[in-house]
Image (spheres, rainbow, N blue to C red):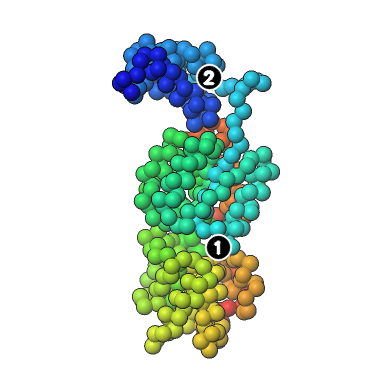
Amino acid sequence: MAGLSKELKYMKIFKDLQINITTYKLRAGMQLLGVRELMAHYNASYSTVMKALRELESAGLVESVQGKGIFVKKRNGANDIVRNNLIGLIVTDMNIPFFNRIIHVIEGELTSRGYDVIIRNTDFNSVVEKDIISNFIERGVQGVIMVPTFDELDTSYLAQVDRDDIDIIYIVRRKHGYNCSFVVPDDYDGGKQAIEFLLEHGHRDIAYISGLPIKENDQRFKAFQDTFMHHGLTVNDDWIIYGEKFEFESGYDSMLRILSQKKKPTALMCYTDSIAAGAMKACRDSGYSIPEDFSVIGYNNEDITDFIEPNITTVENPIADICRMAVGSLIEKVENPNQRNTVNQTVLPVRVVKKKSVRDL
């Protein structure tokens, strides 16, 4: 930018700040960088920066507060530029029924509040996740509700944009590594309840079947380990099985791996109901019965638990409540810029829903 004339530099500063304000990247009440910081950022003179700021003030976009600095001005009236009403929704896999339910609830909640939603899918890829967020910011999306990927590769980037550019609230699971807003189920307690339920029914040889290998952030698996330890039991590592995804096929393939072993468990804890349904199908195809040969407990209380015979005992994930609370929390921030950097964190209780896939030993 060093080669630009003073006039072009002035226009560059003015246009940059104007766009950031009118697209609500800089919101009412937010303080601009100081004059010296703007001079350094744009490699511009004091007079050039002040000219751009005076033009912004004349346009009614900023106001100077004596002794404090320059702030984005609250705009009212018919001549204001109307902000868009776009909210971004990011999920990890639209092909999984659980995420279709999330999309349905959130879309309904946002529509009822006068907002439109842009839905994107990451396929559990953090690079894609980062690209989607960048695109949302460019489009002036007002806020983002996101089911994040399991890894932490993009956490520093998300922390920065969450602080500086756009409100993000996580659902189902959270990002670790920074103080973020989220509405999530109590997955640790859910995992504990699932194992305690199987133990109460006499099971001690219990397998754990999941999708992607997410041990470091898997609260359900941590509860699985801790509950075993609490009862003086030993986890059999041969029965900890991870598949490629969190779908029916992963459960089917993972169960075949367990069935190929000489020593077999009496019960299965599955990361999702779809995985549980796949595992049950593998058992039946291999000549075993549920729950006579294997007891099974799933997670989420999806519709499939009532369509499969026997109906799958599961841990109920209050996903509708999670979605509604997340929408309410995000819109509160969007419509009240003074709450821009507040952090809201909610953990909702879960419970075991007893059906027909677990028997007493």
On screen, residue 70 above or below 304: above
Q: Is residue 21 visible?
A: yes
The residue positioned 47% from the left and 83% from the top of the image is 266
The residue positioned 38% from the left and 43% from the top of the image is 157
The answer to whether 320 appears left or right of 121 in the picture is right
On screen, residue 334 above or below 195: above
Amino acid bearing label 2: Leu
| In front of the other: 70 or 129 | 129
On screen, residue 172 above or below 289: above
Q: CA distance from mark 1 to mark 2?
A: 45 Å
**Mark 1, residues whose alpha carbon is within 10 Å: few (<14), some, or many (≥20)?**
some
Residue 150 is situated, as x and y percent measured from the top left of the image, at: 42, 57
Viewport quadrant of the N terminus: top left
**Mark 2, residues whose alpha carbon is within 10 Å: few (<14), some, or many (≥20)?**
many
The residue positioned 49% from the left and 56% from the top of the image is 92
Q: Which mark, by number, is residue 61?
A: 2
The residue indicated by pointer 1 is 96
Residue 353 is situated, as x and y percent measured from the top left of the image, at: 60, 69
Amino acid bearing label 1: Ile
**Would you say the residues marked 1 and 2 are in contact, meaning their CB atoms lie under 8 Å apart?**
no
| In front of the other: 165 or 322 | 165
Q: Secondary structure at mark 2?
A: loop
The residue positioned 36% from the left and 44% from the top of the image is 156
Q: Secondary structure at mark 1?
A: loop
Residue 11 is situated, as x and y percent measured from the top left of the image, at: 44, 18
